[in-house]
Amino acid sequence: MKLLLAAIVLILIVETNAQWYSFPVEAAQGARDMWRAYNDMREANWKNSDKYFHARGNYDAAQRGAGGKWAAEVISNAREWVQEKLGHGAEDSEADQVANRWGREGGDPNHFRPDGLPDRY
């Protein structure tokens, strides 16, 4: 009975009109999009490119649907929380969050693209 009640509450939280069965798949795909953007950022090692990769990862994940958007928000918030606790500045964290929200809301990640970043990214 408790398990059934928990499942009903979860469905209501996710959104009653969403296709709840696709949410976990979208979330996993969105997490993979975020991971790919992180790996590309590390590989590119390009000065002033982190905001672009933040926006791109969130944009790609959000394009998956509600699950991808949820995963992008959870991952972004967790990453910024850890970065702040490790002593990175609150200003930098807020700038990252601006890029995260921009991408999640469908803004073009190229808005943050630095000059000279290879087209591969």
Image (cartoon, rainbow, N blue to C red):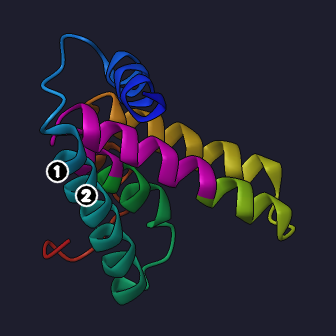
Q: Residue at coordinates 15% horizontally, 42% vertically from top-left?
A: 64
| Residue 59 belongs to the span the image colors magenta | yes
Residue at x 18%, y 11% (from the top left corner): 17
Q: Which residue is drawn at 39% across and 72% down?
A: 38
In the rendered structure, the answer to whether residue 49 lies left or right of residue 57 reads right
Q: Which mark is residue 63?
A: none
Quadrant of the image containing the N terminus = top left
Q: In this view, does 56 lie to the left or right of 19?
A: right
Label 1 sits on a secondary structure element that is helix
- Res 33 → quadrant: bottom left
Tell me whether the residue at label 2 lies in contact with that at label 1, contact meaning CB atoms closer than 8 angstroms. yes
Q: Relative to the observer, which residue lies in front, 80 or 54? A: 80
Q: Image quadrant of residue 59?
A: top left
Q: Give the residue pinned by disc 2.
A: 28
Q: Residue at x 35, y 80 (%)?
A: 39
Q: Residue 37: give x, y in percent of width and height.
A: 31, 68
The percent position of residue 85, horizontal first and vertical second, equals 84, 62
Residue interval drawn in magenta: 58-78
**Left or right: 87 in relation to 37:** right
Residue 53, image x and y in percent? 37, 61
Q: Nearer the viewer, residue 21 or 79?
A: 21
x, y (%) of residue 72? 39, 47
Residue that badge 1 annotates: 25
Q: Which amino acid does label 1 sit on?
A: Val
Residue 20 vertical position relative to residue 50 in the rendered view, above or below? above
Q: Main secondary structure of the magenta part?
A: helix
38 within the magenta span: no
Other-residue count near label 1 (Cα within 10 Å), few / some / many at <14 / 14–19 / ≥20: some
Q: Nearer the viewer, residue 18 or 112?
A: 18
